[in-house]
Image (tube, rainbow, N blue to C red):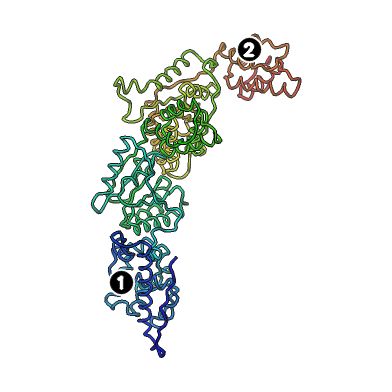
Amino acid sequence: MVELMTVPASDSPHPRRPDPADAFHGVVSSWRAHVEGRARGARGSGPELAASADARLRAVLALGTDEMRFVWACAASAVDPTLYPHLIEVAGVDGRRGLSVAAFAALGGVAPDAAVGLARWLAARPTIVRLGLLVEVGDGAGLTAMATPYRPSPRLLAHLAGADGGGDEELVRVEVPAGLRVCAAQAEAVDTLRRALAAPAPRPLVVVAGPAGVGKRTAVAVASSRPVVALALDEVEPAAATAAVQALLAEAALADAVAVLANVDALDPGAAGWRAISRLVAGSGVDCVVTTRDPALDLDLGGAVVRVTLPLPAAATRRALWDDALVGAPRTADAEGALADVAQRYRLGPGGVRRAAAAARALASGGAVGAGHVRAGVRGSVAERFGGLAEPLEVTDRWEELIASDDTVAQLRALVGRARHARRVYDEWGFPRSTARGGGVAALFSGPPGTGKTLCAGLLARELDRDLYRVDLSRIVSKWVGETEKQLARVFEAAEAGHALLLFDEADALFAKRTEVKSSSDRYANLEVNYLLQRIEAFGGVVVLTTNLEGSIDPALMRRLAAHVVFWPPDHDERVRLWRRFLATGAPLGGDVDVEELADELAGKFADMSGAHIRNAVLAAAFAAAAGEGVITADELRRAARAEYRAMGRVLRGQD
């Protein structure tokens, strides 16, 4: 808090009434000396004595003598009500509204020529005004620059009183954690960052790109020789983003710190709010670092830009991070193997490892952390990163239960081999990759509904020991320009980090053919498809797309596919096997049900049924039996099959 100061009463028995202007400046000088003394006392003395608030402000904001005197006068007027009578008597203004250059000049603060210079300085909106440290009172309508009143912000008052930090909870001082671990590639990125931050003025804007949780803000703190203040833009309401950035830049200016605008992906660079932020950053004179997940994000902030990509830690470093996060926690015998496995498979940064380890500790409930706790903690951390944009699917089917043609099974097995042995073929044998980046596997499953496309995606995930996540298109697609691409970027990033297999069901909704641009809607729809095609190509994991409308898929997708598996409706023999499989669940069957004969009969009568339709018919018969006699009869199965066939839109023959 800034203490209110008053001038001590005179000891003379007949004091002369002081001149109001002298009294005003006497109070300002006393208040200034008081807060300067408090600041020095708080900081200590000797060679370690920090610079005074006056000197710090002059250096940081390039203020001259007259400007500093005006700032001190505004500050004193804001906190000391004893100045109000002097302002009214000499300048005829209410000090509670602030202090204008005209009032300051009337009190003898500056000469007339200097007052004109002050007014021009304020009219040009200097850094101290742009950053909201010296605030123009009202909208200034109808007032000249000379008559516009100004008040200091609470943060400026605190700084003048010697406080080292602001009270804005959204701003975070970034500290380098003890025992920080980085791999060689990360150390190289930090060195690049250090050189950029140490460049001669005017310094470039530095953009640090990398996955979520990789430690981008920490890397800035490691590379900087000055304090680092960060603002997470994804935690700020869009309407309040400009004010929050202004507070960040002001704090960085006063503390001579580097300002970090973290997670700018949360804002739309094309929006009016972003343009206001761009102007703030460009005119602040503060050294800024921007962090983003997208290394190619166009920020349009003007000036020179240095881009640094911070990679995820190598597997050995991730293993050490797991040990650090679980230090002090007892572990079961199988935990060590699980930790080695998750460190190799799941590409998590330090933040992701800490969260997953905390979840594992919580699941262990104070006991020994086991393999199951570790894997559950990792899966929970990965699911959180998807942010509800994709849902995990539990896979219970097995390859031996798959009923499909030999060609289809062979294509699926080849796809497994391609995903499993990609590193050997590309890295060890030297075959060229199809793209400079990526190296993942993308497959298209096409065919009529109910032919097993989603089931086979689950079988692939199970065979490759990956979690299966189905993308929720209803939450991905947005009417706002650029928002769909942001959501997709988050999904792909989470899948890469979480060693997940991505499933785009009904992919024709996203990968539809691009059209001739006749309107802005066509243009933006084409941009979405363009982004998807590029992202599929760069993806390092496994992605499966399914569709019932193969002809609607953009042809450019086809050359990016590792496999295109066509699922045909089952033939008679396959339908017989499907009826037998669904009837062999252990459910009570009536005495009139001969599974072999009935399966052959139903497969012949209802020739267009796929596996999903047969399953639906058997389920309908089972529910009818559960509500009736308690056993599934042959007649119930025939009735259920006829009902499903009608629902498919098929015409039944008279005898059926």
Q: What residue would you read off at disc 1?
A: 118
Question: Of label 1 and label 2, which has the lower sequence position?
Answer: 1
Quadrant housing the C terminus:
top right
* Of residues 255 and 320, the one drawn nearer to the viewer in this rendering: 320
Q: Residue furthest front?
A: 46
Picture layout, residue 58 above or below residue 146: above
Q: Residue furthest bottom?
A: 14
Image point 59% across, 12% down: which residue? 576
Image point 55% across, 22% down: which residue? 396
Q: Secondary structure at mark 1?
A: helix
Asked whether, in this view, residue 160 is left or right of residue 235, the answer is left
Answer whether labels 1 and 2 touch (C-beta < 8 Å).
no
* Of residues 475 and 553, the one drawn nearer to the viewer in this rendering: 475
Q: Secondary structure at mark 2?
A: helix
State the image coordinates of residue 25 (x, y, percent, origin top left): 35, 78
Give the quadrant of residue 560. top left
Inspect the image, locate mark 1, and give the three-letter code of the amino acid beneath it: Leu
Q: Residues within 10 Å of mark 2 (few under 14, many from 20)?
A: many
